[in-house]
Amino acid sequence: MSTMTEVHGRTFGIWTLLTCTLCFLYAFNLENKPVYLATFSSFIYAFGHFFTEYVIFQTMAIANLTTVSIFAGTSIIWMLLQWNAHQQIHAKHS
């Protein structure tokens, strides 16, 4: 099993930048469900990508997958728990 390569590091960096951008956009558009879904999907895709790199292609170490899993997994769970939280706030102001 190899450690994280430079390409994995760059992929993780770009995913982090993309996710931060989406989270920033959603923070200013709480009623925008498509942006929420895009942000949520970015965590699913990242976890899926790095998981397949570890399980199928065996190009990552478990320690690196664990790091991604902590960030992506926590975000996925949190976003699922908050799925309709901001929609209710928006509906009250109508």
Image (spheres, helix red, strand yellow):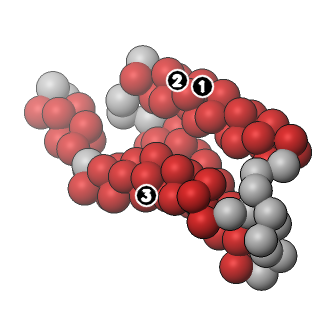
Q: Residue at x 52, y 23 (%)?
A: 25
Question: Which mark's residue is nearer the viewer, 2 or 1?
Answer: 1
Query: Is 24 rendered above or below residue 7?
Result: above
As shown in the figure, which amino acid type bears the numbered disc 1? Thr
Give the quarter of the image for residue 15: top right
| Residue 34 in view | no
The image position of residue 57, as x and y in percent, is: 83, 76
Mark 3 closeness class: few <14, some 14–19, many ≥20 residues within 10 Å? some
Count of marks, rendered view? 3
- Tell me the amino acid under the disc marked 3: Gly
Task: Report if the CB atoms under discs 2 and 1 are less than 8 Å apart.
Answer: yes
- Residue under label 1, please give it: 21
At a point 12% along the width and 33% down the height, the residue shown is: 92
Q: Amino acid at mark 2?
A: Leu
SS at circle 3: helix
Residue 54: percent from left, percent from top: 71, 71
Contact between labelled residues 3 and 1, with CB atoms less than 8 Å apart: no
Q: Which mark is residue 59?
A: none
Q: Residue furthest top?
A: 28
Q: Earlier in the sequence, mark 3 or mark 2?
A: 2
Question: Residue 73 has which mark?
Answer: 3
x%, y% of residue 60?
74, 63
Q: CA distance from mark 1 to mark 3?
A: 18 Å
Residue that carries the numbered disc 2 in the rendered image: 25
- What residue lies at 36% left-to-right and 33% top-to-bottom? 31
